[in-house]
Amino acid sequence: MLTRDTTPRTDRAMPIFITLVVLGILLMTFHVRLDGGGVIGVMRDGAQTIVSPLQRGASYVVNPIADAIDSLGNIAGLREENRALAAALEDKEAQLIAVQSQLARLELFEELYGLNTAGTDIGRTVANVIGRPDPFDVGMTIDRGSKHGIAVGQPVIDPSGYVVGTVASVTASSATIVPITASREGVRVLVGQQIGTLTSQINSAEMRLDIRDAREPVFAGDRIVTSAASVSFPAGLPVGEVLTDAGVEATSIDTTALLYTNFDTLQIVIVLAWPADPVSGLGQDPVPEVTSTTVDPNTTTTDSGGTTTTGEG
Amino acid sequence: MRARTFAVVFFVVLVAVVIQTTLFGRVRVITPDLVLLVSILLALTRIRPEVVLGIAFTSGLTIDLLGSSLLGLRAIVFTTAAYIAIRTRERADIGRIATAIWAGLISLVAVLLLVVVATLFGQSSILGEHVATRLLTVPLANALLAFIVAPTLVRVVDQDPAALRYS
């Protein structure tokens, strides 16, 4: 037995417990009713404003420690992973050389025909992932906020250009992003020429791909990109690939897909200033009046006629 | 609760929140829920039970505010875990291993409750790809951490080097 001092305690635990549970249920109800806005949004912004500087400071110390612990845990797979990464790097370098030659030809043709690019670039803000709330929540906190041009609803991609998710809430210097695996509505995507919807599945890395009005079968390895019908993402962003072959059944296809992005290892993300025009929601071909590029050691922001957007457009 | 104890508890919870959201948010090998563990272990201190419940509620609410899921979800779960801890704390008195098992079992109840409530409220951000694995790894990691830190945490909070000494 332990020698802890057991001073007599009056038992008011039960009524306090019931009160707090009722308060919690009320908060949950308010959250649902206000859709995360109002006083709930203000509370969330306040908490994140206080804690995010601490998280940012801690992440400088913690990241090397986390890398070391992770490396120790995955020491067996590291050599194999390095080999795979080296092979992938060689492949990408070859692709880069091919693209560079194509770009040179494109520039030549543009010069010959006197063409000017119409500013189709979407503003990008590079951000570090500085926090994840707990082992169950897939949301991530990043170190860039509204003062860096980030707004709620903006799409987020990883450094390879693969879709990650959207911005769920923003404070002045931080934001919370929610991966597409946590989206209840799903993501409108394009497989070949067919438009479908990707929705998450419980306890699975695979997502469900549902294509209505299907005309042709899909095959394993088929590339999935965001559709122009999506209100959350610009068209053409790579999302993942079809996992299993599926034929058309009564004009629809139901199969599984695997995302390209690994959310567990994500440390850097890119927030896109899209749509460029929040009123019309037209983000496909923004024609900028002013184009500026700001570069600092951690962030690169390219403004193309409207980095500040609101909502999903 | 004295001002000094309040300051110590505030600091402990704040450190737990920062470590949880940074270090344990990145490490994939060990996945404890440090803030939940602190809420459970505070039941072993001399702090009054109703205050422990209040701390657990506030801690859970803080994690809710930092996350993307429903506000109040973890507040309810942490408060329930703290209440179970208060009601069963005598079972943790036997020794260090008993404390670890006790904390692990309460953590298991808490994460099960979290998943059930999240499912009822359609919180897909909680029900990700690792949810089944985490139902086991979180209580195990919490048990391991409780084995290591429980006596120290209780002594620091109670400011009594003789607190929680097993014989």
Image (spheres, coloured by chain):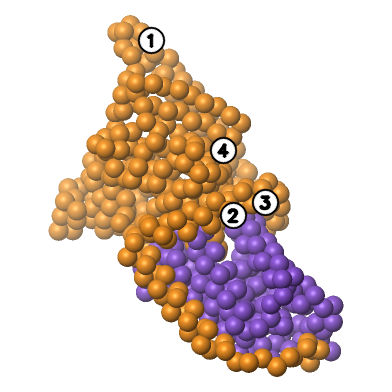
Chain colours: A orange, B purple
Are labels 1 and 4 on one chain?
yes
Are labels 2 and 3 on one chain?
yes
Between the residue at mark 4 and the residue at mark 2, the CA separation in whole angstroms equals 41 Å
Between the residue at mark 2 and the residue at mark 3, the CA separation in whole angstroms equals 10 Å
Badge 4 amino acid: Ala
Are labels 4 and 3 on one chain?
yes
Name the residue beneath numbered marker 1: A108
Image quarter (top left, top right, bottom left or bottom right) of the N terminus of chain A: bottom right
Secondary structure beneath label 2:
helix
Image spot of residue A142 (x, y percent) = 53, 47
Secondary structure beneath label 1:
helix
Are labels 1 and 2 on one chain?
yes
Asked if residue A161 can be seen in this view, the reply is no
Q: Judge the density around disc 3: few (<14), some (14-19), many (≥20) Cα neighbours within 10 Å.
A: some
**Label 3: chain letter:** A
Q: Quadrant of residue A104?
A: top left
Between the residue at mark 1 and the residue at mark 4, the CA separation in whole angstroms equals 32 Å
